[in-house]
Structures are given as C-alpha cells and as structure tokens.
C-alpha cells in the first residue's frame, strides 16, 4: 500500500445542512476530493471550508472556524433560494471542483465585528460576528446610552440596537432601514430597532456608519433581562453593564474563484431581480 504524504495537500472541510439536496452535493464533493491526492478531507485545521446550504449554513461554518480565520478560506454552495455568501448553486458543483483544482490560494477578505460584553460582576465575554450583533431588552423599553469613540452621542429608548458589518448590511441591517455598504469599506453600521420618538423622547433616528478604529459602546441604563444576538446565535443575560463593538483585527476570507460575483450583482440578484417592461 502506498503511504500518502498529506503535507502538500489542501486540507478541506465540508459542512452541509440537513437538507437532502445539501447532503447529495456534499456527497458528490466528498467523493471527488477523496480520490484526489491534492486534497485531504478533514474537519481539523482546514485550509478551505466548503459550506453547503444557504447563508445560515455559512454563518454556522464561520462560527465553527472563527478562531482559525488566519488560515481558513470559505466557499459557499447554496441549495436554497437566496445566497449572499454563496458563490455556487447546487448544479454548479463540477465548476466548483474545477476551480478548486486550479486554485492557487487567492482570496477576498471582508471585515468582521468584534463584540465585547461586560457584565456587572466584571466578566467580559467576547464574540465575533459576520453579519451583526444586536441587543434588545425583554419586557420593557430598552434605555441605553450610545457612545461613539467615548462621545455620548445619544440616549436611546426603544426595542434595541443593531451593529452590522459591511457584508451583514444586506441582512437584518437592511430590514432596519440601514444602508447597503460595499464590503471593502471597513466600517460598522449602527441601526435602531423601533426607537421611541415623540414630544418627550428623541433619538438620532437614523443609522450611523462609523469608520475602522471607532468604538461603539452601548450602556444599558436599567437592570433587566436582555437578549443579545450574534448572527444566528442568541444569548440571554441579566446585569449587562456595557457592550462594545469594533472592527475585528481578523477578517473572513473567501476562495477567490472566478465565480465570486460582484457585490452589486449580488445585491441586484437578491433584492431587485430583472427589470420588466410594463
Ligand atoms: P436564516 O438562515 O433564515 O436567515 C434569514 C435570511 O437572511 C435568509 O434569507 C438569509 O439568506 C438571509 N441572510 C443572511 N445573511 C445575509 C446577508 N449577509 N445578506 C443578505 N441576506 C442574508 O436565519 P439564520 O440562520 O438565523 O440567520 C441569521 C441572520 O438572519 C442574522 O444574521 C440576521 O441578519 C438575519 N435576520 C434578519 C431579520 C430581519 O431581516 N428582520 C431578523 C432576524 C435575523
């Protein structure tokens, strides 16, 4: 039996959601790469992570490897309807395999968000977000100070606040009235969730976009139950003292295949579609 030397092989992890179509695609890629000496299939320390499903699956893949971003490049195959982080459709697997075989390590990288939660007992919990992080108060109106670079910008009253990355600007941020931001712009966007605006209470009322190195701080003014989300993950906390948001030092990288379509084309495909003559 020939002993394989895997040191020069590209280490590839395949992650798929539970849909039959995703499993079929995963199986096809698995069989093709298993028999190719240029690739070594493994979930440990991969160079490339192939996510099969939709944007939600890519978010999960990101979080599974969020501590290995220096090394990992992602590529997404979508088997659902909408794919913002996915370059390939399920019927384009052969093209993906061909491009992987020709791959020379090129990548496109985008900013991600670093969230630090400080609890009243002094504990600090940090996370990374690819789309956004939100804070909401359950039961009652959230009252919180919003600081940008230590300037007290606003006293917010409402349901909550969201801070999104440029690639996350087309996700929850967009539903909150935020702007669509090109992902090469290293900036974060803060949007309000159902702010209270009347004769007594006022908030800024519009989304703000802060540049790299600017720190956003949210300081809740009431003790209570808060829900913090980081992409598709939800955390419940009491005693939230402050939450800070900044651009992380690490970035997410995608395999720069010829399929990696222009951001504006993605925006058009996802939200606008083809023009129709009336
Ligand atoms: P999911 O997979 O059902 O995702 C919800 C929708 O958001 C899907 O259609 C998905 O394709 C789309 N989406 C995700 N990331 C996107 C992006 N960067 N650009 C454009 N569309 C994107 O649910 P999930 O797995 O729990 O995903 C969590 C994400 O859902 C969150 O990160 C948040 O952005 C989004 N979300 C949106 C709303 C809203 O728009 N009202 C509310 C909650 C969560």
Image (cartoon, rainbow, N blue to C red):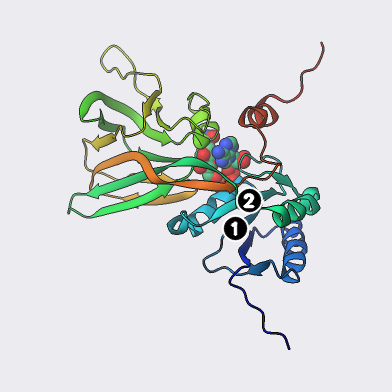
Residue at label 2? 75
Callout 1: helix, strand or loop?
A: strand
- Labels 2 & 1 near each other (Cβ < 8 A): yes
Closer to us: 193 or 15: 15
Kindly identify which numbered label has been placed on residue 48.
Answer: 1
Q: Quadrant of ligand 1?
A: top right
Q: Earlier in the sequence, mark 2 or mark 1?
A: 1
- Picture coordinates of residue 53, whole percent (x, y): 67, 52
Closer to us: 21 or 35: 35
Instruction: Note whether 43 is above or below 265 in the view shown.
Output: below
Rendering quarter of residue 205: top left
Kindly identify which numbered label has been placed on residue 233.
Answer: none
Instruction: Note whether 33 is above or below 4 in the view shown.
Output: above
User: Which quarter shows the N terminus?
Assistant: bottom right
Inter-mark Cα distance, 2 to 1: 7 Å
Rendering quarter of residue 8: bottom right
Residue under the image location 41 percent in, 31 percent down:
187
Q: Is mark 1 within 8 Å of ligand 1?
A: no
- Picture coordinates of residue 202, whole percent (x, y): 29, 17
Residue 104 as seen in the image, left or right of residue 191: right
Instruction: Note whether 31 is above or below 94 in the view shown.
Output: below
Residue under the image location 27 percent in, 18 percent down:
201
Closer to us: 7 or 147: 7
Marker count (numbered) = 2
Q: Do we see residue 131 in this rendering?
A: no
**Number of residues whose C-alpha sits closer than 10 Å to that of mark 2, classed few (under 14), some (14–19) or many (20 or more):** many
- Picture coordinates of residue 128, whole percent (x, y): 41, 49
Callout 2: helix, strand or loop?
A: strand
- Picture coordinates of residue 106, whole percent (x, y): 60, 48
**Number of residues whose C-alpha sits closer than 10 Å to that of mark 1, classed few (under 14), some (14–19) or many (20 or more):** many
Residue 129 as seen in the image, left or right of residue 84: left
């Amino acid at each position: 039996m020939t002993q394989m030397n895997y040191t020069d092989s590209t280490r590839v992890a395949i992650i798929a959601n539970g849909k039959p179509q995703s499993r079929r695609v995963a199986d096809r890629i698995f069989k093709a790469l298993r028999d190719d000496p240029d690739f070594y299939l493994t979930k440990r320390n991969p160079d490339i992570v192939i996510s099969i499903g939709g944007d939600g699956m890519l978010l999960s893949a990101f979080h599974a490897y969020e501590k290995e971003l220096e090394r990992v490049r992602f590529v997404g195959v979508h088997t659902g309807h909408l794919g913002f982080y996915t370059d390939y459709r399920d019927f384009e697997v052969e093209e993906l395999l061909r491009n992987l075989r020709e791959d020379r390590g090129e990548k496109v990288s985008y900013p991600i968000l670093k969230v630090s939660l400080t609890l009243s007992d002094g504990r600090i919990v940090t996370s990374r977000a690819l789309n956004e992080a939100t804070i909401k108060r359950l039961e009652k109106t959230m009252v919180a100070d919003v600081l940008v670079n230590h300037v007290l910008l606003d006293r917010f009253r409402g349901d909550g606040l969201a801070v999104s990355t440029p690639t996350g600007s087309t996700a929850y941020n967009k539903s909150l009235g935020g702007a669509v931001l090109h992902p090469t712009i290293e900036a974060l966007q803060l949007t309000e969730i159902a702010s209270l605006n009347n004769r007594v209470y006022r908030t800024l009322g519009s989304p703000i976009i802060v540049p790299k190195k600017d720190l956003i701080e949210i300081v809740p003014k009431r003790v209570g139950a808060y829900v913090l989300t980081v992409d598709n993950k939800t955390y419940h906390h009491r005693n939230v003292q402050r939450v800070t948001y900044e651009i992380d030092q690490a970035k997410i990288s995608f395999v720069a295949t010829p399929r990696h379509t222009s951001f504006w084309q993605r925006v058009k495909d996802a939200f606008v579609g083809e023009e129709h003559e009336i």
